[in-house]
């Protein structure tokens, strides 16, 4: 039988991992949409509030609101493990996707400009004749 504290440690670890994925998703969202500094600040404050609420609920469910330091350590360990593995890979892939969209957008704009200049030059030759 697993001890109740051991169950809570595992829960704290997975809570930290889930919070790391949530932060990576928020970061990817702000990176893709090129949000301003003020909006990113607001998202970070909301994320901190969610982290605090989740940690409080974990402490409340664990031993009637008596937080233990090792829960916070395991939660931080779960966050760090997820942050250096999957969250980092997710952010790198989002950055590459953003760069690909930017280059594609640049190519489309160049094609549109070339089309416009070709159309203008053909209109000028028609007026001359």
Image (cartoon, rainbow, N blue to C red):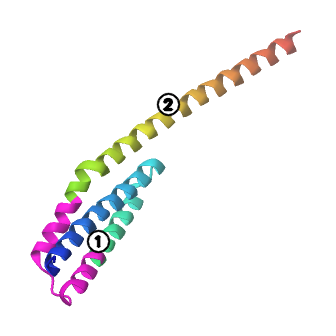
Instruction: Please report the residue visible at 70 percent of the width from the left and 23 percent of the height from the top.
Output: 115
Q: Secondary structure at mark 1?
A: helix
List the residue tagged with mark 2. Answer: 103
Q: Residues within 10 Å of mark 2 (few under 14, many from 20)?
A: few
Instruction: Please report the residue visible at 60 percent of the width from the left and 29 percent of the height from the top.
Output: 108
| Quadrant in the picture for residue 69 | bottom left
Q: Residue furthest left?
A: 69
Label total for image: 2
| Part of the protein shown in magenta | 54-79
Is residue 84 rendered magenta in the image? no
Instruction: Please report the residue visible at 25 percent of the width from the left and 54 percent of the height from the top.
Output: 83
Is residue 64 rendered magenta in the image? yes
The percent coordinates of residue 55 (x first, y second) are: 25, 76
| Quadrant in the picture for residue 2 | bottom left
Prevalent SS, magenta region = helix
Residue 24 placement, left or right of 113: left
Q: Residue furthest bottom?
A: 64
Q: Where 109 falls versus 70 (above or below)? A: above
Q: Secondary structure at mark 2?
A: helix
The residue nearer to you, when weighing 124 against 23, is 23
The residue nearer to you, when weighing 18 against 102, is 18
The percent coordinates of residue 43 (x first, y second) are: 38, 64
Disc 1 to disc 2, C-alpha distance = 36 Å
List the residue tagged with mark 1. Answer: 51
Camera-near label (1 vs 2) is: 1
The percent coordinates of residue 56 (x first, y second) are: 25, 81
Is the residue under label 2 in contact with that under label 1 (CB below 8 Å)? Answer: no
Instruction: Please report the residue visible at 38 percent of the width from the left and 66 percent of the height from the top.
Output: 42
The percent coordinates of residue 84 (x first, y second) are: 23, 50
Q: Residues within 10 Å of mark 1 (few under 14, many from 20)?
A: some
Residue 93 shows which numbered tag? Answer: none
């Amino acid at each position: 039988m697993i001890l109740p504290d051991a169950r809570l440690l595992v829960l704290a670890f997975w809570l930290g991992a889930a919070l790391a994925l949530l932060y990576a998703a928020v970061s990817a969202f702000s990176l893709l949409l090129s949000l301003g500094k003020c909006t990113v600040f607001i998202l970070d404050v909301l994320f901190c509030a969610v982290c605090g609420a989740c940690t409080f609920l974990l402490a409340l469910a664990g031993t009637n609101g008596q937080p233990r330091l090792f829960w916070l350590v395991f939660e931080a360990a779960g966050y760090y493990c997820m942050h250096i593995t999957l969250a980092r890979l997710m952010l790198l892939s989002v950055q590459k996707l953003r760069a690909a969209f930017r280059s594609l957008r640049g190519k489309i704009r160049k094609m549109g400009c070339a089309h416009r200049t070709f159309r203008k030059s053909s209109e000028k030759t028609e007026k001359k004749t």
